[in-house]
Image (cartoon, helix red, strand yellow):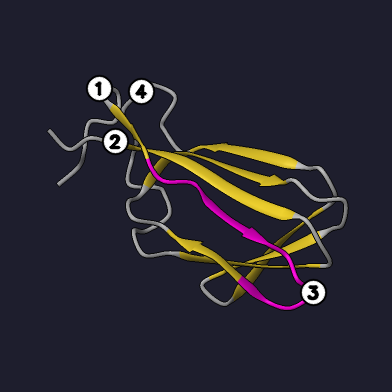
Amino acid sequence: MSINNSQRAIAAPELIATMTGSNVVIGTLIASPTIIIFDNQGSASVVITINDIQWKTFPAGEALVLDMRGNHGIAPNYTFDTGTTFTGNGASGDFSISYLYAKNS
């Protein structure tokens, strides 16, 4: 069943963790995002892993916004799954993941 993502958005709790120089779990998605923001708030690069797959290195201070909605406002089934876990590895600073998801009603 598809969800009409053009109607209502809900803000999920922010996922945030302090980087320690080792792998740190930033958090797990409680819903599939329509818009997701990755934000390296620290002064060192952070390598992000998604479900044990190394995905992207974020330089210090870099943020990335992914709009997972279709251009017409109703998203196809193209997003991260509920339960996706994000891990970061960086020398210091916080890494934040914020997202919105669609209300199913």
Would residue 42 appear left or right of 82 to someone viewing this image?
A: right
The residue where tag 4 is placed is: 73
- Closer to the chain start, of discs 1 and 2, is 1
SS class, disc 1:
loop
SS class, disc 2:
strand
Q: What label does residue 102 carry, if any?
A: 2
- Tell me which segment is drawn in magenta: 12-24
Residue 25 in percent (x, y) is at 57, 70
Residue 23 in percent (x, y) is at 68, 76
Q: What label does residue 7 carry, if any?
A: 1
Q: Are the residues flagged by discs 1 and 2 in contact, CB closer than 8 Å?
A: yes
Q: How many marks?
A: 4
Would residue 45 appear left or right of 48 to someone viewing this image?
A: right
- Closer to the chain start, of discs 1 and 4, is 1
Q: CA distance from mark 1 to mark 4?
A: 9 Å
Camera-nearest residue between 80 and 10? 10
Q: What label does residue 63 carry, if any?
A: none
Residue 78 sits above or below residue 11 on the image: below
Q: Main secondary structure of the magenta part?
A: loop
The amino acid beneath tag 4 is Gly
Q: Residue at x 35, y 23 (%)?
A: 73
Looking at the figure, which quarter contains the C terminus?
top left
The amino acid beneath tag 1 is Gln
The amino acid beneath tag 3 is Gly
Q: Residue at x 29, y 23 (%)?
A: 6
Q: What label does residue 21 carry, if any?
A: 3
Q: Are the residues flagged by discs 3 and 4 in contact, CB closer than 8 Å?
A: no
Q: Are the residues flagged by discs 3 and 1 in contact, CB closer than 8 Å?
A: no
Residue 93 sits above or below residue 33 on the image: below
